[in-house]
Amino acid sequence: MLVALLSDIHANQSALQAVLKSAADAGAAEFWFLGDAVGYGPSPAAAVQWLRGDWAGTDAPVHWVLGNHDAMVSDLAAVAPEDAALNAPWFRVGKDQITGDELWASGAILSQSNWSGTNPKALQVIARHRADLAAGAFGAVAELFTLDRKRPVHVHKDGIDFVLVHSGHVDNLLRYIYAWQVDQFLPDEFLRLGTLGGGLGGRRVQCFGHTHVPTLVHHTVDGAGATVIRATEVVPNKAYKFGDGLVLLNPGSVGQPRDLCTYAAYALLDTEQSTVTFRRIKYQVPWTRMLMQVEDYPEPMIERLIYAHAEPETPAGWLQHYAVVAESYCG
């Protein structure tokens, strides 16, 4: 079966439309989504409608998980604790930069420590998205972005166990996992992935998002019993085999890439052939940029769309790889 794997739409309607059309044209039978439908971009309603299956002409994702921005929208409220449910652990998280309202979080999904590191610009957008969605029946959205959606989703297809998370198994909302973290996060992610269900090893693929960077990392054991972690410098339109070990797979971001390529990213999983193909699709960046400028979105969010900046901690070798891919496939 051919599956379209999407992550981090971030309220970018034009990018989402381009990816859904590309995946449908390729013959995708199902869509799987790894979280962050909202945040950053100008069109939260379109992304939410897609999740709910009421966006005309598109199929909703069969499997999906909650992202940290989705959790913030659901967890946030512009009410004081005394006006809210008495049994909820409300706490102040900041102030709406547009309305001046005090912003409070319920603590139902994200703890106070989770909220403490939230970028004020991102929080400004979350408050705006919450207000926009509230105007169009936020209650239904609150029911969509629930604590249950935070849990990993397990899908077994053609002899492979796929595990869907937003950021990782150790922290399913806020951990950033990159291909170069061989001595940092990758070993314990693979350990957790390999021991799911009480068994070590097996054909298992962890699909994650959050970093906005296409990623493919294999975990195998060599003839001497030593662990080998191998990251692949992926390029678009090439099929990569999963192999017989464990795999960490990030399709990249639909709506806000961070690898120097402005084209929307997603991946096609061929479960029968045990392969993944990374895709990059051109979309109307100027249109999305215009919407954000007209609506006075924070400039750093707009710059991300225009330049697809990589994270500052990205090693030089990976930056060079991103630059080559961007020049070759994102002209």
Image (cartoon, grey):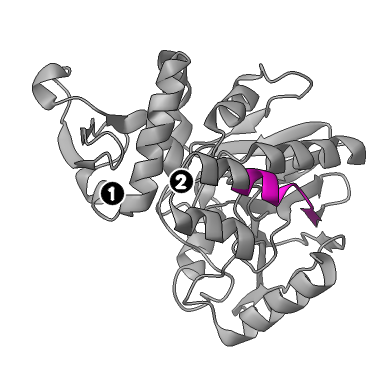
- Residues in magenta? 279-289
Name of the residue lying farthest toward the bottom? 316
49 vs 209: above or below: above
Query: For numbered disc 2, what is the local secondary structure?
Result: loop
Please report the residue visible at 62 percent of the width from the left and 60 percent of the height from the top.
306
Q: Amino acid at mark 2?
A: Tyr
On residue 114, the disc is 1
Name of the residue lying farthest toward the left? 82
Q: Which residue is mark 2?
A: 297
Query: For numbered disc 1, what is the local secondary structure?
Result: helix
Q: Quadrant of residue 20?
A: top right
Please report the residue visible at 43 percent of the width from the left and 51 percent of the height from the top.
298
The quadrant of the rendering that contains the N terminus is top right
Residue 223 seen in this snapshot: no
Q: Earlier in the sequence, mark 1 or mark 2?
A: 1
List x then y, in percent, for residue 213. 61, 62
Query: Of residues 298 and 188, which is closer to you in this image?
Result: 298
Query: Of residues 115 and 228, which is closer to you in this image?
Result: 115
- Does 100 appear in magenta? no
Please report the residue visible at 70 percent of the width from the left and 53 percent of the height from the top.
203
List x then y, in percent, for residue 162. 66, 45
Q: Amino acid at mark 1?
A: Asn
Relative horizontal placement of residue 312, taking residue 127 as reference (left or right):
right
